[in-house]
Amino acid sequence: MDKFNINNMKRIQNIILLGIPLIFILACIFHFLYDVTGKSTIAAIIFPINESIFEHLKLALYPTIFYWLFAYIINYKYYNINLSKWIIGCTCSLILNILIILSCYYIFKGAFNYSSFFLDICSILVSTGLGQLVSLHVYKNIHNIKLPLIISLILILSLIILFTFFTFNPPELPLFIDYSNG
């Protein structure tokens, strides 16, 4: 790898790692924006509308998508970012983020009947950090990208559609119950 490509990869690595604090901060801000927007229907698509675990998964989904989208738009031409690898990396971060948050919630709440605001914040921070680290590894090491790219695009689009649908049509399942008010 020549010096230009090594420097570009270091910059891309820094952009992905910068996502850890920025996605976390976005998630914290997003938590309150539904009420701030006057509980608009459009805001309900992106921001949590109640305290259910499902709605809190939006704090992993949309801040991650927005960060990866804006980071790409701002940096792609300066650092020769590969769009296909970028989308695959974003998808890996999203999936791991969601799985870790769900795991933390169900392990602590389900197994130990323990929940706390601090634990919720930590699970978002840990999931974001691990998601970004895995996505960095994927970006650096993936070579055959056609099938993973198609799968990634389908997954991201499916998540957005499913989250939107279930926001307005939540099934009567524990994942969708707001335990703060039933």
Image (tube, rainbow, N blue to C red):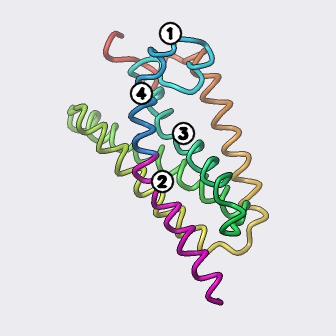
Badge number at residue 19: 2
Q: Nearer the viewer, residue 166 or 122?
A: 122
State which tag comes first along the sequence, 4 or 2: 2
Q: Horizontal and vertical percent for residue 132? A: 48, 58
State which tag comes first along the sequence, 3 or 1: 1
Q: Nearer the viewer, residue 80 or 87?
A: 80
Q: Secondary structure at mark 3?
A: helix
Q: Quick one: quadrant of the N terminus?
A: bottom right
User: How many C-alpha atoms fall within 10 Å of the one at disc 3: few (<14), some, or many (≥20)?
Assistant: many
Mark closer to the observer (1, 4) = 1
- Is residue 18 covered in magenta? yes
Q: CA distance from mark 2 to mark 1?
A: 28 Å
What is the magenta range?
Answer: 1-22
**Residue beneath disc 4:** 31
**Residue beneath disc 3:** 61
User: How many C-alpha atoms fall within 10 Å of the one at disc 1: few (<14), some, or many (≥20)?
Assistant: few
- Quadrant for residue 56, please give it: top left
Q: Horizontal and vertical percent for residue 105? A: 33, 37
Q: Secondary structure at mark 4?
A: helix
Q: Secondary structure at mark 2?
A: helix
Q: CA distance from mark 4 to mark 2?
A: 18 Å
Instruction: Tell me what residue is drawn at x 31 percent, y 15 percent.
Output: 180
Three-letter code, disc 3: Leu
Q: Quick one: quadrant of the C terminus?
A: top left
Badge number at residue 38: 1
Q: Horizontal and vertical percent for residue 55? A: 47, 26
State which tag comes first along the sequence, 1 or 4: 4
Mark closer to the observer (3, 4) = 4
Three-letter code, disc 4: His
- Quadrant for residue 174, please give it: top left
Q: Main secondary structure of the magenta part?
A: helix
